[in-house]
């Protein structure tokens, strides 16, 4: 395949003229029904970062159909997943709506609206069939935004002659074949290749790291770009961070207070066993917030993406709990693994 086909998308067959030209179903009727059932006075809306700009428009639509005495509030807190609920707003509203992610924590108060994408997925699946998929067996995974097309994808691959392997992961996952940025249990299947249908680099990178014996083909239906996951650059970054931390004397151990991201046991164990480790609690972990701490390295027990996505931006090495154990000599360097979350909080 030419380099151009890896880097440039072809939108002619996707039903999309622009990258972000799509409509979402915000399930407003479901929200209105919940307000009526609970005789609610306040409604809280939480959007992921990429959809916050749609918040005022959704609030306006709700105001038109809700009673005048119902207040609609929009969360301004950062939101990167179903594990990242605005608990302050949730406690102060009668109905709390979390957009863009499938349920992770069941609650009568929370309404999860997954916001399925209407982009056509089969053109990108066809490219994968024509250019990268081999043999007769393939594992199929996708993200919450494309779960509404999962059966369509499976049937299309079967019609093309493949035996499609799928499974539902652990309790942190809602659907069969679904992967999160922190959990790839659904890819633990009996096939040497996995087709990931979705955007971004993080999910397929995690897939390739957690399943190094499998070929991970990335079919991005939004941009109609086809690539194969390559972990070499990522591994070099991680090894470099671990090497820098091997000389560290003081470690800042970060416990994230977001409701679905805390790994208290791991944070406590590190601090209890290292007199030069200091527990730091934070809700939002950013390079600027850590710059004033006089530490030689940090250990992140919160969302793995803080380390893998943002790690190079921190002024001192940012390690996963396992990378910390490698840095202090408890595990060998070649044992390095991708950091994931399993189970519920």
Image (tube, rainbow, N blue to C red):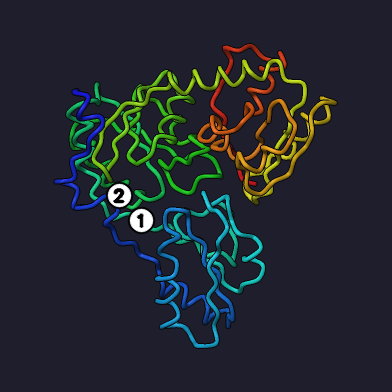
Mark closest to the chain's N terminus, 2 or 1: 1
Where disc 2 sits, the SS reads helix
CB under 8 Å between discs 2 and 1: yes
Say which residue appears at 18% left-offset and 37% top-offset. 159
Give the residue at mark 1.
116
Give the residue at mark 2: 149
Point out the residue furthest to the bottom here.
Answer: 68
Q: Position of residue 248 (x, y in %)?
A: 72, 20
Q: Position of residue 132 (x, y in %)?
A: 24, 25
Callout in the foreground (2, 1): 1
32 over 98 or under it: above or below:
below
Q: Look at 67% across and 37% down and name the residue there.
A: 291
Above or below, 322 relative to 71: above
On the image, which quarter does residue 301 sit in? Answer: top right
Question: Which quadrant of the view contains residue 306?
Answer: top right
Dot 2 crowding, Cα within 10 Å, few <14, some 14–19, many 20+:
some
Distance between the Cα atoms at labels 2 and 1?
A: 9 Å
Describe residue 134's horizontal placement relative to residue 49 as left or right. left
Query: 166 above or below 27?
Result: above
Q: As rendered, which of 87 and 246 lies closer to the eye?
A: 246
Percent x, y for residue 192? 35, 21
Which residue is at 40% across, 41% downward? 177
| 184 or 305: nearer the viewer | 305
How far from the left and from the top, in percent, is residue 93?
61, 72
Q: Quadrant of residue 176?
A: top left
Q: Helix, strand, or loop for circle 1?
A: loop
């Amino acid at each position: 395949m030419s380099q151009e086909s890896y880097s440039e998308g072809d939108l002619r067959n996707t039903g999309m003229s622009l990258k972000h030209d799509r409509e979402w179903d915000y399930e407003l009727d479901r929200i209105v029904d919940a307000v009526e059932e609970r005789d609610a006075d306040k409604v809280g809306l939480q959007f992921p970062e990429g959809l916050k700009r749609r918040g005022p428009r959704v609030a306006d639509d709700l105001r038109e159909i809700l009673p005048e005495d119902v207040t609609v509030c929009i969360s301004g807190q950062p939101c990167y997943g179903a594990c990242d609920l605005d608990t302050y707003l949730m406690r102060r509203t009668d109905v709390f709506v979390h957009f863009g992610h499938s349920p992770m924590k069941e609650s009568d108060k929370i309404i999860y609206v997954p916001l399925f994408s209407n982009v056509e997925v089969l053109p990108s699946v066809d490219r994968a069939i024509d250019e990268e998929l081999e043999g007769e067996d393939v594992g199929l995974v996708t993200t919450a935004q494309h779960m509404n097309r999962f059966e369509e994808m499976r049937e299309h691959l079967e019609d093309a002659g493949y035996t499609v392997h799928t499974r539902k992961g652990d309790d942190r996952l809602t659907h069969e074949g679904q992967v999160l940025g922190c959990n790839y249990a659904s890819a633990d299947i009996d096939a040497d290749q996995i087709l990931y249908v979705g955007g971004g680099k993080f999910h397929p990178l995690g897939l390739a790291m957690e399943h190094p014996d499998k070929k991970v083909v990335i079919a991005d239906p939004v941009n109609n770009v086809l690539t194969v996951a390559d972990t070499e650059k990522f591994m070099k970054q991680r090894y470099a961070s671990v090497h820098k931390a091997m000389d560290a004397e003081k470690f800042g151990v970060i416990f994230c207070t977001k409701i679905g991201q805390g790994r208290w046991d791991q944070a406590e164990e590190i601090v209890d066993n290292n007199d030069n480790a200091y527990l730091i609690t934070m809700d939002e972990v950013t390079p600027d917030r850590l710059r004033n701490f006089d530490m030689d390295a940090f250990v992140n027990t919160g969302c793995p993406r803080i380390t893998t996505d943002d790690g190079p931006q921190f002024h001192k090495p940012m390690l996963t709990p396992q990378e910390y154990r490698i840095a202090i000599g408890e595990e060998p360097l070649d044992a390095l693994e991708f950091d994931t979350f399993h189970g519920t909080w």
